[in-house]
Image (cartoon, grey):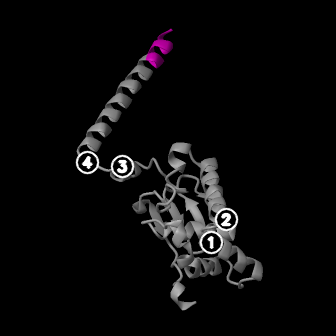
Amino acid sequence: MKQIISEELEQFHCSILLEEVKEKIRKLKAYGVEDDRIVAVMNEEELFPQLIITEEFKIMLSGDNPIEVEMEPLVKAVYLLFLSHPEGIVLKYLPDYRKELTALYLKLRPYGLTDRVKKSIIDVTNPTQNSINEKCTRIRKLFASILPKSVARYYAISGKRGEAKKIDLVRANVIWKCKLPNSQGL
């Protein structure tokens, strides 16, 4: 009986604390503090795992048991492209990023481009085709399978129709251990 009362009391205290946190967040927003800043503070408390891009271009989530986020090469190249552009990319301008995406793909698969891969890169950078949306959906589902939904959305590529699509993860939480290729040399 004593344990039941203790658990109920603990739940009651937690609900009060959560209401206080909500109220503080409302006040911060009223003062003009943006969501990204609030999330950054939450990141400092390690609520979100760090995203680490290794020297071998592996995508890892930090923690006691680091997790590799495995993606097929073109999907990974798309993800790294968006990750390297924190301002986001408007999909209608994707053809402007074709060389950069190709350079990223070649880092992941250095043995060259087949005709099939070249066509896939053209398709994914063609805003009139659905290929880019398919890749973004795969990425979103992948992170949702690893992380809580409320956290996973910050790791996925998202954005409103017609506006820049981007990864909302605070960039201080992204660690690049690799050097991104220079698309100018292609």
The x and y percentages for residue 118 are 70, 80
What's the magenta bit mostly, secondary-structure-wise? helix
Range covered by the magenta-colored residues: 1-8
Which residue was labeled with disc 4? Answer: 32
Q: Quadrant of the C terminus?
A: bottom right
Q: Residue at x 32, y 39 (%)?
A: 25
User: What is the distance, in whole Å, between disc 2 and disc 3 at their CAs?
Assistant: 30 Å
Q: Residues within 10 Å of mark 1 (few under 14, many from 20)?
A: some
Q: Residue at x 47, y 19 (%)?
A: 7
Which residue was labeled with disc 2? Answer: 131
| Earlier residue among tags 2 and 3 | 3
Q: Magenta segment: does it hold 7?
A: yes
Which residue was labeled with disc 1? Answer: 126
Q: Are marks 1 and 2 in contact (CB under 8 Å)?
A: yes
| Earlier residue among tags 1 and 2 | 1
| Earlier residue among tags 1 and 3 | 3
As drawn, the label of residue 35 is 3
Q: Which type of secondary structure does the marked residue at label 3 adopt?
A: helix
Q: Give, as a three-letter code, the residue at label 1.
A: Asn
Q: Are marks 2 and 3 in contact (CB under 8 Å)?
A: no
User: What is the distance, in whole Å, between disc 1 and disc 4 at their CAs?
Assistant: 38 Å
Q: Which type of secondary structure does the marked residue at label 1 adopt?
A: loop
Q: Give, as a three-letter code, the residue at label 4.
A: Gly
Q: Between residue 101 and residue 70, name the one nearer to us.
A: 101
Q: Give, as a three-letter code, the residue at label 3.
A: Asp
In the figure, 152 relative to 131: above or below? above
